[in-house]
Image (spheres, rainbow, N blue to C red):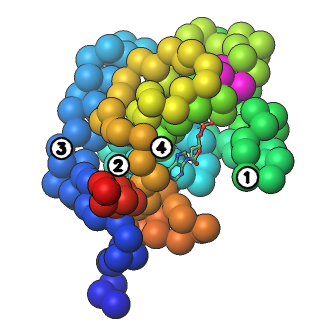
Amino acid sequence: MAEHAHPPEFEVLLDTEAIQRRVRELGAEITRDYAGRELDLVGVLKGSLLFMADLARAIALPLTCDFLRVSSYEGGTKTTGVVRFDFDLTQPIKDKHVLLVEDIIDTGLTMSFLLETLRLRMPASIKVVTLLDKPGNRRTEVPIDYVGFTIPNRFVIGYGLDLEGRYRNLPYIAAMKEPAAG
Ligand code: IMP
């Protein structure tokens, strides 16, 4: 298998060039919107790892970076909607301009939990940037301020996203192939 390869049941959905171009655009937009302010980028691990690294480099503003990790409690094969912190931020966000950085918003349960929880800490503002938005599977309404790509309701891997822990290092995004019709 080549160094960067996806499993055969997946196909390329977004190539490296398309991702890099879009991340630069998002960075430029965020730079304009936050001009004159200091930004606190908060990456949601582990999926936002690659996006966060590229996005931070595309934003031409003074900024700080922090990370948190949450997991949703899985009851059997279904997400129950119960989200908890695996680990929290290292710095307070009171009076800061927080931009939450996510890899993908699917049901929306993780992001609505995070917004609800972090708002209690009185940031000056809190916004959301996600590389991918999968609105077809939403279970709760989430305000998203910046979206890289809106994608169909398919399981994706690469550029931070995993399948059982693997494939986060793919520089592109691959989606599980649709079963052939008929
Ligand atoms: P939500 O709470 O359902 O919005 O899910 C958010 C999290 O689920 C993301 O941060 C991912 O870790 C994971 N996730 C959702 N869809 C996918 C996918 O297609 N591939 C890999 N991980 C996914």
Q: Which residue is mark 3?
A: 21
What is the number of the mark on residue 54?
Answer: 2
Secondary-structure class at tag 1: loop
Q: CA distance from mark 3 to mark 2?
A: 11 Å
Question: The residue under label 1 is which amino acid type?
Answer: Thr
What residue is drawn where x is 46% and y is 20%? Answer: 144
Depicted 89 relative to depicted 179: above or below:
above
Q: Is residue 114 left or right of residue 174?
A: right
Q: Which residue is mark 4?
A: 103
For the point 41% across and 18% down, which residue is it? 145
Is residue 159 visible to us here?
no
Q: Main secondary structure of the magenta part?
A: helix
147 in the magenta segment: no
Give the quadrant of the N terminus.
Answer: bottom left
Q: Residues within 10 Å of mark 4 (few under 14, many from 20)?
A: many
Q: Nearer the viewer, mark 2 or mark 4?
A: 4
Secondary structure under tag 2 reads helix
Which label sits on residue 77?
1
Magenta-span inclusion, residue 113: yes
